[in-house]
Image (tube, rainbow, N blue to C red):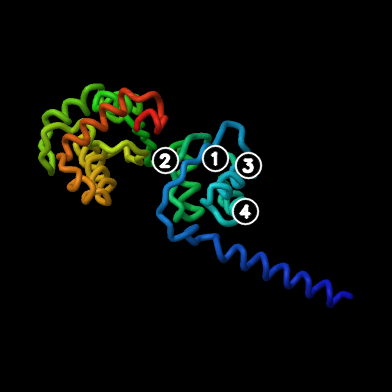
């Protein structure tokens, strides 16, 4: 009986040792995908670990809690809205959670947004002074030439670093994304016998005038 108990204890020790070794100081995954996670005020360590596991940011919530306790960080993880990459280690995640903010901000540009709208969105995020984006859109020397940027700045969700944010780089990023998105339709555009400017202008008009996201209305 004693041997059986010792055997079970030995297997248990091996099992937990293996769990710890697999994740303790290893990146969570190879993916560089970014994930939004909200840590609310009053959340305890167990809730935080479960939230991170649910978001795919850690593989083992139990070992994460052991890590936090071992490092004396149980009461140092702060509430906040975070953008975390999936390939972080426990040490990197806890380092970010101690400061109450991540290095990146999530910026969503809704469909139909004009340059003025984007300017307001960026200003609300404290990324620019009001008017900076509009001024850059009109005066900045960009890596491409175009008569008007309206309709060419692709609406989507972007992740930006406030420390090195610039309106010029953001404009070029949105424009590059636009080019990527329309690449599969280049042949159709050519066959339409219309210029890309014409198509973008009409699409922008439809986006403004149509009621909500009703596709039939837009057609």
Between the C-alphas of marks 2 and 1, the distance is 15 Å
Question: In terms of sequence position, does the residue under pointer 1 or pointer 4 come before the other?
Answer: 4
Q: In the visual, does 126 lie left or right of 54?
A: left
Between the C-alphas of marks 1 and 4, the distance is 15 Å
The reply to whether callout 3 and callout 2 are in contact (CB within 8 Å) is: no
Q: Residue placed at 35% from the left, 41% from the top?
A: 159
Asked which secondary structure carries label 1, the reply is loop
Between the C-alphas of marks 4 and 3, the distance is 14 Å
Instruction: State the residue position of label 1.
Output: 76
Q: In the visual, does 205 lie left or right of 4?
A: left
Percent x, y of residue 28: 50, 57
Asked which secondary structure carries label 4, the reply is helix
In the rendered view, tell whether residue 209 sits above or below residue 42: above
Residue 90 versus residue 75: which sits nearer the camera?
Answer: 90
Judge depth for marks 2 and 1 and give the one in front.
2
Asked which secondary structure carries label 2, the reply is loop
Question: In terms of sequence position, does the residue under pointer 3 or pointer 2 come before the other?
Answer: 3
Residue 3 versus residue 134: which sits nearer the camera?
Answer: 134
The reply to whether callout 1 and callout 4 are in contact (CB within 8 Å) is: no
Q: What number is the disc on residue 102?
A: 2
Percent x, y of residue 110: 36, 31
């Amino acid at each position: 009986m004693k041997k059986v108990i010792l055997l079970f204890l030995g297997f248990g020790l091996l099992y937990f040792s293996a769990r710890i070794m697999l994740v303790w100081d290893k990146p969570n995954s190879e993916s560089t995908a970014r994930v939004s996670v909200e840590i609310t005020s009053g959340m305890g360590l167990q809730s935080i670990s479960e939230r991170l596991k649910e978001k795919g940011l850690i593989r083992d919530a139990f070992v994460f809690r052991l890590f936090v306790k071992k490092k004396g960080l149980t009461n140092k993880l702060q509430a906040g809205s975070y953008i975390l990459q999936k390939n972080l280690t426990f040490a990197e995640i806890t380092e970010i959670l101690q400061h109450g903010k991540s290095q990146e901000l999530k910026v969503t540009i809704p469909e139909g947004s004009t340059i003025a709208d984007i300017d307001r969105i960026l200003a609300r995020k404290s990324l620019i002074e009001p008017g900076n984006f509009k001024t850059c859109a009109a005066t900045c020397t960009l890596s491409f030439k175009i008569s008007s940027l309206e309709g060419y700045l692709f609406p989507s969700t972007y992740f930006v670093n406030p420390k090195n944010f610039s309106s010029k780089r953001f404009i070029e990023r949105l424009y590059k994304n636009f080019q990527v998105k329309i690449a599969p339709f280049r042949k159709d555009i050519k066959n339409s016998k219309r210029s890309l400017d014409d198509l973008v202008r009409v699409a922008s008009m439809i986006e403004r005038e149509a009621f909500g996201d009703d596709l039939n209305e837009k057609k």
